[in-house]
Every structure is written in structure tokens, then in C-alpha cells.
Image (tube, rainbow, N blue to C red):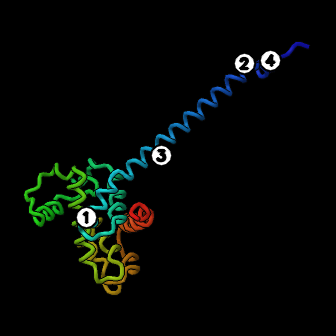
């Protein structure tokens, strides 16, 4: 009995070999793409570590916290631009930048200078240190400072009524914007992850 064309095609060793080669090539390509993505992400993630360490030390801020803010604000892209005009690694607003520039004696500060990683980290970390100091009498200054960094002082004052005025857990529950609550939680979680980068 003659074999059907479908059966003959299925048992063709050349076609089977081609499928195996093609599958192997696709797997190799996927592995290469994954390795490339991991390498570029790892390189980008650690690119600013020495600068973050130096600037954080200058302002007395935990470098892991600064790095976590950079991750959340710009994902380590120095030329990031926010929808409301925020710039750079820490998405510094013009008002915060001018305040820093005046205190640092580099006033006036051209907007484009905030795209320089060092300048942006200096301004952003200075501002974060100021916020941490502002909420230093609370039991969780980072929670209050991060909410302020993300949503502004007016919102923090509104959320920090009664027991939430100094209690970090109560304040976190009182945060009225789900996006700000998520911001605080994500930054704090990444700070824990980044601590090993600064040992």
C-alpha cells in the first residue's frame, strides 16, 4: 500500500531536521535577547551608583533611598521629562531646582542643567533631605517625605490630620491618592532592594 503524502511529509528526515534547527535558532535568539536586556538593565541600574553615594553622603540621606526615588521617577534615564515639566533622574520641578540653586549659590539655574545627572541628583537629593528634615519628628519621616515629593505639601497636610500627623502607618492609610500610596510603597520596597548596592 503506498504511503499518503501527509505521512511521507511527516517522516521526511530533512523537514524534521529543519524544524529542529529553526527551533534551536529561535531559542538561541530568545536567550540572546534576554541576556542583552539583562546586561543593559543591570548596567543602567548601577551606572549612577558612585554619584548617588557621593551626593547622598553630602546631604546625609540614605543612598538606597535616593536610588529608589531615581528608579521610580525616571528608571535611570537622565533625560527623562515629566508631563508637568519635571526633569532628569529625580524628576526635579523647576520650583525645587530654583530653591536648591539659590541655597547652593548657583542661581539662576538654566533648565537644561537639570538634565545633567550630577546637577539633578544634587538638586533632587537636597530637596529630599529638606523633606526628611521637615518630617523628622514623625515616626516614619520617609513615608511623609516621599508623599510630599510625589503629591506636594498641601496634600500631605490634608492627609496628616489627627493621629496621622506623626504616625507613619496611619498617615499611609490616610493618603488620598492611590498613585501616591503606591509611589511610597514602591520606593520603600526598592530602597530595601538597593541597600546591598551601598554596603
State the SS at label 1: helix
User: In the image, residue 101 lies at what x, y percent?
Assistant: 12, 61
Between residue 135 and residue 154, name the one nearer to us. Answer: 135
Q: Residues within 10 Å of mark 2 (few under 14, many from 20)?
A: few
- Residue lying at the far front of the rendered structure: 199
Can the viewer see residue 182 in this picture? no
- Residue at horizontal 47 percent and vertical 40 percent from the top: 36
- Residue at horizontal 42 percent and vertical 44 percent from the top: 40
User: In the image, residue 30 lies at what x, y percent?
Assistant: 55, 37
Seen in the picture, residue 121 relative to 138 is either above or below; the reply is above
According to the image, label 1 marks what residue? Answer: 125
Residues at marks 1 and 4 touching, judged by CB atoms closer than 8 Å: no
Name the mark nearer the viewer: 1 or 4: 1
Residues at marks 2 and 4 touching, judged by CB atoms closer than 8 Å: no
Q: Earlier in the sequence, mark 1 or mark 4?
A: 4
Position of 145 compared to 111: left or right? right
Can the viewer see residue 3 in this picture? yes
Seen in the picture, residue 124 relative to 174 is either above or below; the reply is above
State the SS at label 3: helix
Measure how far apart labels 2 and 3 are at the Cα level: 36 Å
Label of residue 38 in the image:
3
Quadrant that contains the C terminus: bottom left
Measure how far apart labels 2 and 4 are at the Cα level: 11 Å
Seen in the picture, residue 116 relative to 147 is either above or below; the reply is above
Amino acid at each position: 500500500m503506498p504511503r499518503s503524502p501527509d505521512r511521507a511529509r511527516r517522516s521526511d528526515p530533512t523537514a524534521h531536521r529543519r524544524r529542529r534547527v529553526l527551533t534551536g535558532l529561535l531559542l538561541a535568539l530568545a536567550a540572546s535577547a534576554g541576556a542583552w536586556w539583562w546586561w543593559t538593565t543591570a548596567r543602567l541600574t548601577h551606572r549612577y551608583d558612585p554619584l548617588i553615594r557621593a551626593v547622598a553622603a553630602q546631604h546625609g540621606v540614605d543612598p538606597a533611598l535616593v536610588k529608589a526615588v531615581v528608579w521610580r521617577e525616571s528608571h535611570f534615564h537622565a533625560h527623562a521629562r515629566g508631563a508637568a515639566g519635571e526633569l532628569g533622574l529625580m524628576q526635579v520641578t523647576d520650583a525645587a531646582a530654583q530653591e536648591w540653586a539659590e541655597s547652593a549659590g548657583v542661581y539662576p539655574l538654566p533648565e537644561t542643567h537639570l538634565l545633567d545627572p550630577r546637577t539633578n541628583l544634587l538638586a533632587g537629593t537636597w530637596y529630599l533631605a529638606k523633606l526628611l528634615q521637615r518630617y523628622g519628628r514623625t515616626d516614619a519621616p520617609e513615608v511623609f517625605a516621599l508623599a510630599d515629593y510625589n503629591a506636594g505639601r498641601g496634600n500631605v497636610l490634608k492627609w496628616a490630620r489627627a493621629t496621622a500627623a506623626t504616625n507613619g502607618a496611619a498617615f499611609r492609610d490616610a493618603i488620598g491618592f492611590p498613585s501616591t500610596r503606591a509611589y511610597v510603597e514602591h520606593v520603600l520596597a526598592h530602597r530595601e532592594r538597593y541597600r546591598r548596592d551601598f554596603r
